[in-house]
Image (spheres, helix red, strand yellow):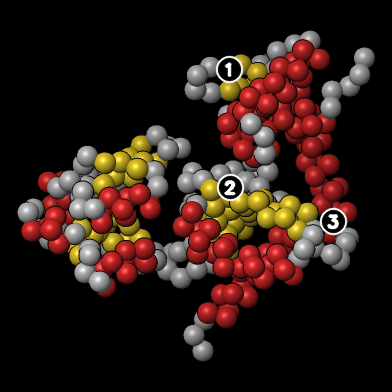
Amino acid sequence: MTRASLDDLAAFVAVTRTQSFTRAAAALGTSTSNLSHTIRRLETHLGCRLLQRNSRSVSPTEAGGTLLETLGPALESIDAALDALELGRDRVSGTLRITATRQTYDAVIRPVLPAFTAAHPDATVEVLIDYAYRDIVADRFDAGIRLGEKLEQDMIALKVGPDLRMAVVATPDYLKRSSPITHPSDLTRHRCINYRLVAAGTIYAWEFERGGQALDVRVSGPLTFNEPALMLEAALDGLGVGYLLDKEVAPYVENGRLIRLLADWTPPFPGFHLYYSSRRQMRPVLAAFIEAVRGRSRARRPV
């Protein structure tokens, strides 16, 4: 009997670690339907069911759990061996996989791509835009870039941008026909533009702090998005009060299209961080990318 292919086994491990065909497919660079076909083929080949599926989750069967206990360490050993071979080469090559939000892509990744790709023609950069916190080990990413996230202990975090602030904004026309906003609690009486945390399945509570007092305010309104750019457009259209990064609204505050509110309740917080696993040797392509990001940060730093 022929053995199951290594790719099929790796696909099974990816599904069990992410507990999702959708997330595993994204990590493996394939479609969900192709991944489902791969798992069915593997189960047929082995003659047993490996995964239990329902509408909300995926989990291994008893046979799948037994297989996973052996496969996980084995695949990590293979990855380590391949990384060791790559570390032995002087030339930076291979695919660098990064998970980022659109904001972090624009602020951190996009500016360094021209110089990085020119300096390392044998390297490929693959960016997955996503707003959920990703387990970069399970999802087979080299690194992730997010706002101040709570990272696991085996992650190394590198600050790659200045501190940031949030901003509460609305159009002059909206404010003329609405009650004053002088305290975060006033927002509960306004039409606000909400942000959905898709992975958590919840609506984000707006965070405020002043003089040691922290407030989380759950607002309501006619619109909810999971994309900050759409929230900004809705605020500019006068459809409600927005809560966005100050750097994104600054041009519109300066030209008068938006008015900033509650500025004394939105102090700075740590900005964008690049994070990667401390359990693996750093691949040359990741080391080169980090150096490119650091080089740009040094160039922008005031003398």
Marked residue nearer the N-terminal end (3 or 1): 1
Locate residue 303 relative to residue 16 in the image: left or right.
left
Viewer-nearest residue: 267 or 180: 180
Residue at 86% over, 66% down? 90
State the image quarter where residue 61 is shown.
Answer: top right
Q: Does the CB distance between marks 2 and 1 fall below 8 Å?
A: no
Q: CA distance from mark 3 to mark 1?
A: 37 Å
The picture places residue 111, in percent across and down from the top left corner, at 57, 68
The residue sitting at 58% across, 23% down in the picture is 58
Residue beneath disc 1: 53
Amino acid type, residue under disc 3 in the picture: Glu
* Residue assigned mark 2: 128
**The label number, if any, that marks residue 285 in the structure image:** none
Name the kind of residue labelled 1 in the image. Arg
Q: Is residue 222 visible?
A: yes
Mark 3 and mark 2 in contact (Cβ < 8 Å)? no
Q: Where does residue 117 sit, x and y in percent of width and height?
A: 70, 64
Question: What is the C-alpha distance between the residues marked 2 and 3?
Answer: 23 Å
Which residue is painted at 42% across and 68% down in the image? Answer: 163
Indicate whether 222 appears above or below 86.
above
Q: Give me the disc on residue 86.
A: 3
Q: Secondary structure at mark 2?
A: strand
Q: Amino acid at mark 2?
A: Leu
Nearer the observer: mark 2 or 3; the answer is: 2
The quadrant in which the N terminus is found is top right
The first of marks 2 and 3 along the sequence is 3
List x then y, in percent, for residue 235. Answer: 25, 54
